[in-house]
Amino acid sequence: MIDFDYIRATTLEEACSLISQYQDTGKILAGGQSLVTMLRQRLIRPEALIDIYGIKELDYLEFNGKDGLRMGALTKHRTLEKSPLIKEKYPVLSELEKSVASVQTRNWGTIGGNICCADPIADPIPALIALGAELKIVSMRGERTVPLENFFLDFFTTVLEPDEILSEIRVPPPAPNSAVEYMKFSTIEAGIKIVSVSVLVAVEPKSDVCRDVKIVMSAVAPIPLFARKASEFLKGKKFTDSLLKEAAEIAAGETNPTSDLHASAEYRKELVKVLVKRATRKAFEKAKAA
Amino acid sequence: MEVQRKAVQKKLLKIRVNGKDYEVMVKPNRTLLDFLRQDLGLTGTKQACMDNSCGACTVIVDKMAVKSCNILALQVYGREVTTIEGLASPDGKLTDLQEAFLDFNAFQCGFCAPGKVMSATAMLEEMEDPTEEDVRRDMEGNLCRCTGYKQYIDAIMYVVKKRKELKQQKAKEV
Amino acid sequence: MEIREKFSVMAPIKEVWNFINDPLKIADCIPGCERVEKIDERTYESLVKAGVGPIKVHFKLTTILTQIDEPRRIKMETRGADLGFAGSVTQSTEVNLKEVSENETEISYSSNITVVGRIALFGERIMRAKAKELGEQFVKNIKERLERKEVSS
């Protein structure tokens, strides 16, 4: 690893002050489960790390019926995985956190770090987008809110300015008769995923009409992709198998995957069709039962 | 081009390892693994993949299993770390998990062993009654090239069973 | 990694040939190319910056023109390494020109690139996506420069 300086921040204000001094020569260190890996591989070369892991004011998990979920950026993956609150209100997060990396990584890594790292195949992100998550971002200059689906620009690139810190993730309260399903495909169970899909369906239980549909796909573009056309296509219509098939085709058409070592672009497009169909159907069934 | 960096200062690390307190000056880019092995001479924890994927470097920090190769030593300032050297009691008596691993032939080359033992130790402190599926899932972060995993899982399930029996026995005695 | 492109430029073949044989003009078309220096008649050195997000690479490259068949074909070999030790690259490229008409030339190029090192291990999937993007930008730049020149002359 290259040499870098290390400063521990004890409050959010201190962290903001430090990062505004260092700007993009400094990097915010939370759990470091992505950052330290990149440092060891000499892929990034910051001059200083600002350790925010000990900032208590960024580690919390709160829910109320009006505002929904508010979690501090330092909430650990393991906390989300084991939380009875998350299991009750957002079971899709509980489920998918079980398969994020390994226990060791989940014990130390944070959801905020995961989002800011902006690896387009990160597990929680498509589900959080389907859930309508919003981010609170702070700096010495003030604060702003960004919908998670607008946060990503490219591989490992977000809209965060060099002096900004992600402080909170907000998820609206679950809508009545709605469910979010997350599905991923990998050739080995615990291996790198080829494609993943997360779908929100909110349904009118009597008429089977989809009040709201949000299809999000990852690993098929440099950023998590919201399948706008496919989602709009299904929205407002009565759920049928043939409509679902068409929506899946539209979603696959919205992707722009690249062939690589793990799968060809064609195979990814085909997988998207299958996963969108399965995940949407599951979400629909769960939404009806909710 | 390579930025000319000014010399980086070492920082103070206060840490408790296997029950003993240390105050050492370390460079910020020192991983916990290198600190344990090179600065403290505790070579039981292994470095294998250099890729953050195998878990051979697993240690316990404040009751949580973590991969020490992927954490900087300074990140665990003020925390309590347990390594494989810290499990057996001072008179050399092994823990029930360590005994079970030996009895069930869970080691072949033995390189992944410390990581496996630490992960299993932390897991059973957290979960009293895991199913085999729970155990398999929570041990996913420890890879083994030799055994095919079955012996490890059997050893852990055996310890789970024995601990439950012991607990029931104690409850009856009370 | 293989990159193949075939595209037409509204410019006479002689002009296209002169353009692609001028390393300064070609360097201008390569996204991230910072500097080109002629070492001898067939050898050039260049610095190319690339990256995504916080990951940045800075390749120092040496290109040797191995075959020059004016005005139709040029072959070259490139070798280089990242100044930050993230990896190294070797590349074989062939460019073919075909006269479609007095004022139109078809350019087809094929390039075989091998990247080794940490950047390749970690960034394989990212590299391929970026290589595709860079290739598309390169073609766009060549067309723009050649056709703009055509208009102004």
Image (cartoon, rainbow, N blue to C red):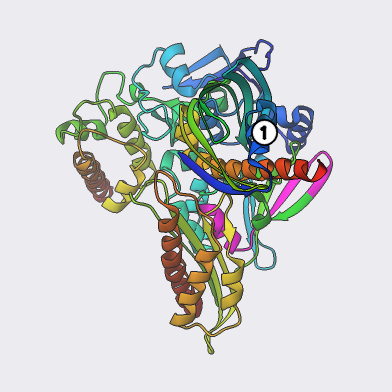
Residue A193: x %, y % from top left: 42, 50
Side of A191 relative to C144 (left or right): left
Residue ID for mark 1: C19
Residue A155: x %, y % from top left: 59, 44
Residue A11: x %, y % from top left: 72, 35
Which residue is at the front of the view, C114 or C7? C7
Res. C32 visible in picture: no
- Chain ID at mark 1: C
Q: Of helix, strand and loop, which one carries label 1?
A: helix
Q: Is residue B81 above or below residue A289?
A: above
What residue type is disc 1 on?
A: Phe
Q: Residues within 10 Å of mark 1 (few under 14, many from 20)?
A: some
Q: Quadrant of residue B88?
A: top left
What is the magenta range?
A123-143
Q: Is residue A179 above or below residue C124?
A: below
Residue A27: x %, y % from top left: 66, 31
Q: Quadrant of residue B163?
A: top left
Q: Residue furthest right?
A: A141
Q: Residue at x 25, y 20 (%)?
A: B92
